[in-house]
Image (tube, rainbow, N blue to C red):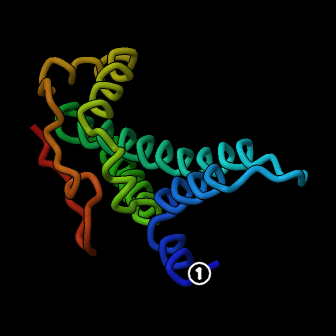
Amino acid sequence: MERADISLYDDDFYAWTQQQAAVLRGLPATSNQLDAELVAEEIEDLGRSEVRSAQSLCENIIEHLLKLEFSGLSEPAGHWRREIIEWRLQLEKTLTRSIIAKLDLPKRYGSVLRLLRHEAPPLTQLLKSAPSECPYSLDQIVGSGDEDWFPEPR
């Protein structure tokens, strides 16, 4: 493996999986036993799994940020903050430029609202106050730095 490939592998695993799959597909067909197309698909799936993981973590964080801001509940707030921090730490290990480009925050927010519609009251009440578009930036969701950001309760 060339040094540039190792660097891409370390810096942006998703981009590396997509690049390696393209390289495999571009190899000349040989009479050996390598199923290049299937191997390429498996490598791409590894990258897509990283994207899905980051998307899921963002959804979890957005859901809990909404609960903190709009639920009016104080009892579980400490638990929600702890979970947000845990998910942010996991997300930090996963995010790369190419994964950030695939996050699609409006779609993540729509999924969260759909999920919240099926919560038990009083959490379903927060939907009346929640904005129609995601109120949080990627920086707020990721919570960069040592000081984690949380919204003020309304």
Residue that numbered label 1 is attached to: 2
Mark 1 surroundings within 10 Å by alpha-carbon count, few (fewer than 14), some (14 through 19), many (20 or more) = few
The answer to whether residue 55 is visible is yes
* Relative image position of residue 49 (x, y in whole percent): 56, 46
Image side of residue 68 versus residue 128, left or right: right
Q: Secondary structure at mark 1?
A: loop
Which residue is pictured at 37% across the width and 56% down the height? 98
Give coordinates of residue 103: x percent, y percent: 34, 44
Quarter holding the N terminus is bottom right
Q: Nearer the viewer, residue 34 or 146?
A: 34
Residue 61's image quarter? top left
In this rendering, would 153 be left or right of 62? left
Q: Position of residue 11 (x, y in %)?
A: 45, 72
Work out whether 151 lies above or below 128: below
Toward the bottom, the furthest residue is 3
Judged left or right of residue 43, residue 68 is left
Query: Label 1 is placed on what type of residue?
Result: Glu
Residue 21 placement (x, y as % from top left):
60, 52
Q: Residue at x 26, y 43 (%)?
A: 65
Question: Is residue 82 at all visible to an observer of this figure?
Answer: no
Name the residue nearer the viewer: 112 or 29. Answer: 29
Which quarter shows the C terminus? top left
